[in-house]
Image: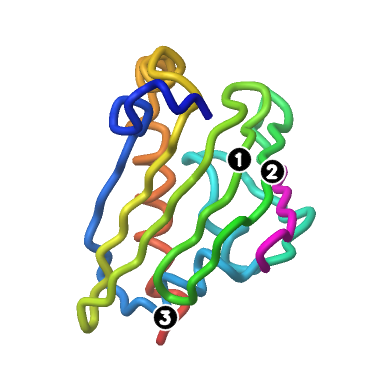
Amino acid sequence: MNPTDNLKNRTLTIEKTLNAPVNVVWAAWTQPEHIAQWWGPMGMETTVLQHDFEVGGRWKFSMHMPGKGDFITEGVYSEIIENEKIVTSADFKPMTEGVELHVFFKSMGDQTHFSFNVIHETEEYCKQQEEMGFYNGWGSVFNRLEEYLPEIGS
């Protein structure tokens, strides 16, 4: 990451209040059987190829888009605080590489405040990713997450 660029100007953020307790949202983010059900934009099927959920652990998912092939997404976890925070590197090949995800979870009783932050290497790269459809793409992913959460239970 480039420390000379302002962090705020290198970060894209989506925040939502999800209608599920934090332990359910956490399970959706951390258990491969759940990740496969919602990770990826609408119309994509996800296969969890690797998921070592620990600091220093690697993750790798394959997202299949009919007619367009497979997209690989992978990274390494650098910080995990149960039910609160996940930090990981992330490459979404071939569209986005060299970003860091900071995902925050805050319990609000039967709901969870969720903050998803993608930190880019430069302000220019951040702006490019936003223009490529960051909010629509990730918005679709988190709509799928929201729809899937009732299936997990508490």
* Residue 18: image tag: none
Residue, x 73% and y 48% (percent of image)?
A: 60
Residue, x 59% and y 22% (percent of image)?
A: 95
Figure quadrant of residue 16: bottom left
* In this view, 16 is above or below 75: below
Q: Name the residue under label 2.
A: 74
Task: State how far apart marks 3 and 2 are (Cα).
Answer: 24 Å
Task: State how far apart marks 2 and 1 are (Cα).
Answer: 6 Å
Q: Are the residues flagged by discs 2 and 1 in contact, CB closer than 8 Å?
A: yes
Q: What residue type is disc 2 on?
A: Glu
**Which image quarter is the C terminus in?**
bottom left
Badge 3 crowding class, 10 Å Cα cut-off, few under 14, some 14 to 19, many 20 or more, is: some
Badge 2 crowding class, 10 Å Cα cut-off, few under 14, some 14 to 19, many 20 or more, is: many
| Mark before the other along the chain sequence, 3 or 1 | 3
* In this view, 122 is above or below 111: above
| Mark before the other along the chain sequence, 3 or 2 | 3
Q: Is mark 3 on a helix, strand or loop?
A: helix
Which of discs 3 and 1 lies nearer the camera? The answer is: 1
Q: What stretch is highlighted in magenta?
A: 54-62
Q: What residue type is disc 3 on?
A: Asn
* In this view, 15 is above or below 119: below
Give the residue at the far front of this rendering: 4
* Residue 23: image tag: 3
